Image (cartoon, coloured by chain):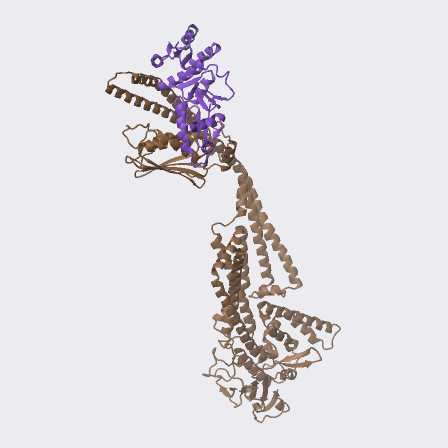
Chain colours: A brown, B purple
Amino acid sequence: MDTKWKKGKVICSFMVFAIGVTMLIVNLVPALGIFLALEGRVFQQQVDYQESWEFRNLISGRLEELLGVATGGKSWGNDETGVSPTTDYGCYEGSAEGFGGWLGRAFNEVTVTEDAVTEQSASESAPDDYWEAQEDWLRHQDEVYEAYVNQLIEMGMDADGEALDRYFNSYDYDNGYGYAYTYASGWTLDEYMAEMAHNKNIRYAIVYQDKLLYTNIEDYEGQTGEAWNGTDFYDVLSREAYNFTLWYNRQGDGKVQIVKDGLEVDVYGDGIYGDDSLWRVPGYANYTLGESAKDAVIFLAAAKEPQLYLVGDYSGYGLDQYGGRLYRMRQSVVVLNREFEKRCSYLIASAILIIFGVLLHKSKRVADQKIADILGKICLEIKIPLCLFIFLFLVGKSAGVLTAMVWKISNGGSYYCSWSGDIAYEIARMMKAGGYLAAFYWFFYLVFLDWKGNRQKQKKPLIRMLRTKDFKYPLQKRLVRRQRIAVIIEVIILMIAGIFLSVLCLLYGMTADYLGYESWEWVEWGYGWTLGGELYGLGMLVLIFVVIVLGVPAAFMAVDICMLRRNRKLAEDIGALSDQIQAVREGNLTEDLHMEGDTDLQEAARNLNEIQKGMETALREQMKSERMKVDLVTNVSHDIKTPLTSIVSYVELLRQEQDLPEHVKEFIQILGEKSERLRNIVQDVFEISKATSGQLPVKMEILDMGKLLRQTLADMNVQIAQSSFTMKFTIPETPMPVMADGQRLYRVFQNLLQNALRYSLEGSRIFLTLTEEAGQIVVRMKNTSSVELTDTKDFTERFVRGDESRTDGGSGLGLSIAKSFTQACGGSLVVETDADLFTVTVSFQKAESVVLAEEEELS
Amino acid sequence: MNECVLVVDDDREIVRAIALLLEKEGYRVLRAYDGMEALRILGEQSVQLIIMDVMMPKLDGLSAMLKIRERKNLPIIVLSAKTEDTDKILGLSMGADDYVSKPFHPQELAARVRSQLRRYTMLGGIHAQHEEDEIVNGRLCYRMQERTLYADGEPVKLTATETKIMELLMRNQGRIFPAEEIYERVWEEPSFAPENTVMVHIRHIREKIELNPKEPEYIKVVWGIGYKMEKR
């Protein structure tokens, strides 16, 4: 129950934190972007779109266009006037006034439409396949549009279903038509102007040489072609609905007068047109028009709240749409406001989540640890390429968006100052950028977790697997195998690199024309594909694949295999050499290593053979001298023992003599003691010589160190009780099994205790502890020495004692015997001195207690 | 009549010392200085026990012993300067009844002589006709009905606890008893680190039954495991 709750808490805390952070990053970028784009004018329902750069751009373009119309006559594209719509703003810009700026982008780039429309325009007599072609074209347009909408959805615009609907409905085919028509030059100016008149968002009137040429103000439409009497066109328009008016050359001064909300706008500033001038209209000192323009008077009025004007067109495409650009200009600002509000609410929500996450940071840390553990289980060989791939993928995907965003914002631009109308598109990109930033955040977060948690214990199973498997083989095979593996890995890496490179080449090759940030998207959309291109690309892919993926690795492999062959002989020789070293180590000193004369390692083999010979000789001599030593000690001790027997016996006889004077009895006592000591020394010397020459027979069995110590203490109980020392021993009841010879081990502790009893400071305490330390059974005996100890002395050396005078009863061999016996049983004995504190540590590997239990049962 | 002991050693001083010691104990002592001489004396006189060195000129102790064993069944104590277990085992397996290593303590040798002679002369037939309630192990014999331990045919004065320990060990010769088990079976109460208590009693028993309590032959410590009665 408790653990379940804990687990739930851990998961919750992490989810809260994760969602909070992701929401924050994703929403912060568009929120910031909108805020900057709208120059901080957010949270306003009544937004003045007329202050935007796009509006000014449109109006001045319109003015120029109408000037062109006024001065250019009936023929479209006339360039005789000072200003031509085709030069300064382009036919497209002018003619596609009714065209949505947002969708215009998509159209603008669809090359297919132009062809299709041209075909259509040329076939007024409707050939057989005309309607089919129409349908195809429409279907294609639908597809294009759908792809565009899909992309908008991808960018996050689906949040606003209404907006999407609007985009869909406002989609107008006729502008594509118009645009194409314009290019085809089949349209008369009258026809064009008639179309434009449908756009009631901009009211205009064109007067040339005091004659009203065109207008879409209803009250004056009947007067076209008649003389203009100088009336104000604005009088018949609602000042509420049309709050913006522009007059060109009303006073005959070739200047523009703009009135907005009843106030005149300062159009020219210092009168010089420059980069910072808001209005690009004629009338500046450095921007005047030709003579013909002096006869023109243009009136323009813009609606405060533009509408979308739809006109049924039953001859062709069902629905025509006009005035969309102004409409969308205003709508986009409204939408952006709403969008900003939404982003802000998300930001607040994410902030609350993050606060919760901070409150639960302890559980979150547990979750982090869990994630790190999971990541730690992935082996490094997978992790590194995966990281690299994800990182490169993210960078590749986001570079365009991020740099564009940074550029947009860092250039200090805004919607009101310089941006074109495609603001929603920009915001969608920003949202995309937010998404990428979040992805980056999580990528680095995971990398950081992994680095922090798994730096030390990173699994490398592949490498380790190869390595552990490696040791099964003899050296020569190992060397060959390693080279082989290296070749395989090399080839795999080359192949992966090749695939990556060829895909990269292909992608860039196919989209070379679109090498901008959108090139990837183009490929995704499939616009870059044509049949020819596809075939070409496929051919290229196959070619690149063959060359890079197969050819280069094959070449590398060939080279490596050649090298491998040459190295194999060397590997074999190294293997033989290593085997020989192994044999020498194991004691085989007689067989020489034979190697052919031309091998690289001939010298090494000869040297090894000589070392072998030298070792053999040395070993033989050492064994001989060792045997001689033991024989000598045996003989000497035997030869000492015989006379010693006589001495002991006669001392005993003397002791039994009656009527001896007191001092003689005392002498006899001394003789007895000294002969006893001599006996002990002889015995000890004999034992130590055997132990150090490795001839001490040991009977190893599993025994309990605790019991052995208690037995030893019990055995020496009388001695201890008679001494002035206090024994302090800590021997746990739990079994402490060791593998040793009990008899020898008893001698070890007997010697140690005797040593302590003999050399400790009068009245001091002797400490004996038994502990288990990391699989070792450790006996530690500490006592305070009665004489000052010298640090440099090795007390386990033969005949070394603390007191150099040698008048005590010891042989000087006690510790030496203890050490030899301990080592003979497979343990270790270490003597340490610290001032007068004398510490002996005897340690043995702990034996399997199971075996001991069985033994006890058997006995 | 006093028992006659033959002492054989090439070291005259040792022979003399042993002879003096044993004569003080009341034995009649014959002396020989090599194996051949020992065999000759044996052929001439009635000898109840032989003490013989191993390393001797003309005929070494082990060979002489083999020859003696062809005809006679008297106890032989072997003396040797070699103290290794293998030498001891070799000597005992070739017919020696006891083994004393040089340099020995004269009192110990005397005790061993006493022990061997007692068993040979007084209780010579003990092996053949021992009763059913007897447990025999070398010099020791435990009579269950009497609850008495005999060493070399003489009753040993043991306390009640000591008797209980000896009964337990004699009944299970060769088996290793952890100190806890001895304590629990003799004192009949749970034990806690009983090595010391058990050891005190064993020491006392050893002083009563062993010829050389410092090098016990019967009750042995199996270091790190427990205690046992050696089968002899």
Image spot of residue A38 (x, y percent): 51, 76
Looking at the image, is A842 positioned above or below residue B131?
below
Determine the residue located farthest toward the bottom in the rendered image.
A229
Please give left or right for residue A469 compared with residue B65 in the image: right
Image spot of residue A497 (x, y percent): 56, 53
Q: Tell me the quarter of the image containing the N terminus of chain A.
A: bottom right
Please give left or right for residue A677 compared with residue B143 in the image: left
Looking at the image, is A559 positioned above or below residue A334?
above
Determine the residue located farthest toward the right in the rendered image.
A128
Q: Residue at x 30, y 23 (%)?
A: A673
Q: Is residue A289 visible?
A: yes
Would you identify the image quadrant in which residue B161 lies?
top left
Would you identify the image quadrant in which residue A425 lies?
bottom right
Looking at the image, is A646 positioned above or below residue A295?
above
Q: Is residue A437 visible?
A: no
Looking at the image, is A742 positioned above or below residue A120?
above
Image spot of residue A554 (x, y percent): 59, 48
Image spot of residue A237 (x, y percent): 58, 89
Front residue of this view, candidates A849 and B184: B184
Q: How many marks?
A: 0
Determine the residue located farthest toward the front in the rendered image.
B146
